[in-house]
Image (spheres, rainbow, N blue to C red):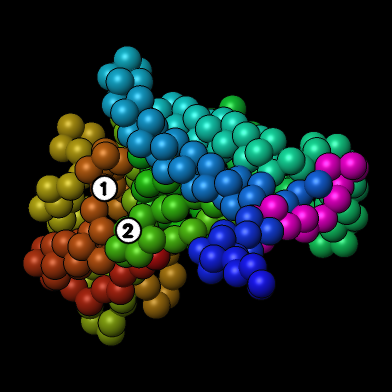
C-alpha cells in the first residue's frame, strides 16, 4: 500500500527548506534566508522607531537649549547617526554576518577612495568641521560665490541657502571651506552701495550740492534701511561724460528683503527725487 503524504505537510517542508536555505558561508558562519529576512525587518523597524524617538526627544532638547536652531540640528543629526549605527549592528548580528568582513570591505573602500571618491570624503570631513567649528549657522545671511541668502539647513553634503531671488541654492560644503565667503548673523547689519552716474549733456548745469540733497531724500524714502544711521554719500568719480555718486545704505540682516524688491524700491525713489539724467549701478550683493 502506498503511503500518501498530506499536501500541507509538503508545503510546510518546502517553506522550511527555503527558510533555512544557506546563501553563503562567511568565516565559518552560515548565512541563511531566514537571517537576511529577519535582519531586513529589524533594519526597517529600527529606522522607523528611530525617527519616532527623535520626534519625541528633539522638542525636549530644543526647549533645554533655548531653541538654538544650529545646536539642535547638530544633535538631531548625531542622534540619527547613532540610532542608525545601533540598528545596523543589531541587523548584522541577526544576519549572522561577522563584523570582521568589514576589514575587507574597508580595504576595498580605501581603493575606491583612491580611484575617485575623494570629493565625497572631503564633503563629509568639511561637514564635521562645520558642525564643530560653526563658521556658518542656520539663520545666517551668507554671500558665497555671488549668491546671497539665508542658510536654512546644513546637510552632510551641502548647505541649503534661500537666496534673495527666492530660489533654494545647494552649496557643497567643500566650496564653503575652500573659498572666501561673507556672513551676517541675525543682529548684524548688511550694507548696500548704489552708484549713480550723472550724465553730462551739453549745456546742462550740474548742482552737486542739490544732487546730494536729492540722494538724502532717496535714502529717507527707503523703509528697509536703518533710519538712525546717517546715509553716506560720496562723489566718487568725475569725468567729461559723467560724474558718479555713491550712496551707502545700511539695514538689519534679519529684515533683509528679496533683491528685486530692494532694487525696485531704490529705482522708484531715484526716479521720484532726481531731476537730471542718470544711470544706476549696484554693489555685488544686489546683483
Residue 259, horizontal then vertical, whole percent: 29, 61
Q: Which residues are magenta?
A: 18-29
Query: Hey, which quadrant is residue 236 in on the image?
Result: bottom left
The CA distance from mark 1 to mark 2 is 8 Å
Residue 158 in the image: above or below residue 188: below
How packed mark 2 is, by other alpha carbons closer than 10 Å (few <14, some 14-19, many 20 or more), is: many
Residue 26 magenta-highlighted: yes
Residue nearest the observer in this picture, 172 or 142 = 172
Mark 2 lies on a secondary structure that is loop
The residue indicated by pointer 1 is: 256
Q: Residue at x 44, y 70 (%)?
A: 239
Residue nearest the observer in this picture, 280 or 143 = 143
Where residue 130 is drawn, which disc sits there?
Answer: none
Residue nearest the observer in this picture, 103 or 58 = 103
Q: Quadrant of the N terminus?
A: bottom right
Residue nearest the observer in this picture, 61 or 65 = 61
Residue 161, horizontal then vertical, whole percent: 42, 53
Residue 264, horizontal then vertical, whole percent: 19, 67
Residue reaching furthest to the bottom: 202
Asked if the residue at tag 2 contacts the one at tag 1, i.e. Cβ–Cβ closer than 8 Å, the answer is yes
Residue 145 in the image: above or below residue 123: below
The residue indicated by pointer 2 is: 164
Amino acid at each position: 500500500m502506498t503511503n500518501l503524504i498530506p499536501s500541507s505537510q509538503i508545503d510546510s517542508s518546502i517553506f522550511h527548506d527555503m527558510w533555512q536555505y544557506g546563501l553563503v558561508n562567511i568565516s565559518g558562519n552560515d548565512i541563511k534566508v531566514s537571517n537576511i529576512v529577519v535582519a531586513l525587518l529589524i533594519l526597517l523597524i529600527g529606522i522607523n522607531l528611530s525617527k519616532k524617538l527623535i520626534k519625541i526627544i528633539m522638542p525636549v532638547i530644543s526647549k533645554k537649549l533655548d531653541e538654538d536652531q544650529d545646536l539642535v540640528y547638530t544633535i538631531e543629526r548625531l542622534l540619527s547617526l547613532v540610532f542608525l549605527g545601533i540598528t545596523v549592528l543589531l541587523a548584522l548580528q541577526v544576519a549572522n554576518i561577522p563584523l570582521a568582513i568589514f576589514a575587507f570591505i574597508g580595504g576595498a573602500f580605501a581603493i575606491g577612495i583612491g580611484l575617485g571618491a575623494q570629493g565625497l570624503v572631503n564633503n563629509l570631513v568639511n561637514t564635521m568641521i562645520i558642525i564643530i567649528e560653526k563658521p556658518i549657522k542656520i539663520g545666517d545671511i551668507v554671500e558665497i560665490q555671488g549668491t546671497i541668502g539665508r542658510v536654512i539647513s546644513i546637510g552632510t553634503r551641502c548647505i541649503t541657502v534661500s537666496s534673495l531671488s527666492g530660489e533654494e541654492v545647494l552649496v557643497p560644503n567643500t566650496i564653503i571651506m575652500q573659498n572666501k565667503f561673507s556672513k551676517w548673523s541675525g543682529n548684524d547689519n548688511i550694507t548696500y552701495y548704489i552708484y549713480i552716474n550723472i550724465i553730462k549733456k551739453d549745456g546742462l548745469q550740474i548742482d552737486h550740492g542739490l544732487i546730494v540733497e536729492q540722494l538724502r531724500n532717496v535714502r529717507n524714502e527707503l523703509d528697509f534701511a536703518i533710519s538712525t544711521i546717517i546715509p553716506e554719500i560720496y562723489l566718487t568719480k568725475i569725468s567729461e561724460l559723467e560724474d558718479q555718486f555713491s550712496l551707502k545704505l545700511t539695514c538689519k540682516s534679519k529684515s533683509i528683503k528679496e533683491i528685486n524688491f530692494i532694487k525696485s524700491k531704490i529705482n522708484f525713489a531715484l526716479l521720484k527725487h532726481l531731476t537730471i539724467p542718470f544711470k544706476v549701478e549696484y554693489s555685488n550683493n544686489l546683483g
